[in-house]
Image (spheres, rainbow, N blue to C red):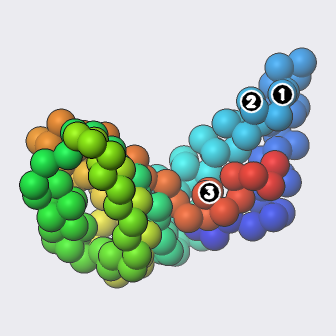
Amino acid sequence: MKVTDQLIWELSNKAISELGVNATPENIKKYVENEVMKLNAGSTDTTGEKVMGRIILTSFGLNRPGVVAKISTCLANLNCDLQDISQKIMQEFYTLIMMVDITNSPKNFREIHDELDKVAAELNVKIYIQHEDIFAYMFRI
């Protein structure tokens, strides 16, 4: 689902209404992020269109050979297109950021998330994904 300024505005107002006195900027931001994640969790949005676009993948943990290969292989098997990658090794730890296009994947966001969770458990690392729309609008609230 495409996240628009209008959607962010509507969700922000809904958050303010539902949160009442607890409607701090941080709580509103969390509320909107959760609602957008729910909308993007299925393979289709409310209009029946397949969820497309890019995700931001971040990962970190103890460095060892094969971490990037395992994550990249998982994404390739899901027919996801790795468009950009940044990695940093800091002593025995690594951090990794990937920009991944999921448009051609037969899997939806939730299924991709679940497959990456399996890889994270196997490697004993952390892997987080976030739809690019959420990332882009996160600071607009």
Kindly tell me whether residue 90 is visible in this rendering.
yes
Query: Residue 118 lies in what quarter of the image?
Result: top left
Foreground pick, 31 / 66: 66
Q: Measured from the top left, where is residue 30 in percent x and y?
A: 67, 36
What's the distance in space between the residues labelled 2 and 3, CA to CA? 15 Å
Query: Residue 8 lies in what quarter of the image?
Result: bottom right
Q: Measured from the top left, where is residue 7 in percent x and y?
A: 77, 59
Q: Name the side, left or right, on which 96 lies relative to 124.
A: right
Q: Amino acid at mark 1?
A: Thr
The residue under label 2 is 27
Circle 3 — which element? helix
Q: Is residue 111 above or below residue 45?
A: above
Instruction: Tell me which residue sits at (82%, 34%) in the image.
Output: 25
Circle 2 — which element? helix
Closer to the chain start, of discs 3 and 1, is 1
Closer to the chain start, of discs 2 and 3, is 2
Instruction: Tell me which residue sits at (82%, 44%) in the image.
Output: 12
Circle 1 — which element? loop
Q: Is residue 18 above or below residue 86?
A: above
Instruction: Tell me which residue sits at (89%, 18%) in the image.
Output: 21
Q: Is residue 107 above or below residue 62?
A: below
Q: Measured from the top left, where is residue 107 in percent x and y?
A: 30, 66
The residue under label 1 is 24
- Using the image, tell me which numbered label, if any, was put on residue 63: none
Q: Amino acid at mark 3?
A: Ile
Foreground pick, 52 / 65: 65
Q: Name the side, left or right, on which 37 lies relative to 99.
A: right
Q: Are there few (<14), some (14-19), or many (20+) residues within 10 Å of tag 1?
A: few
What's the distance in space between the residues labelled 1 and 2, CA to CA? 5 Å
The residue under label 3 is 134
Given contact means CB atoms under 8 Å apart, are the residues at marks 1 and 2 in contact? yes
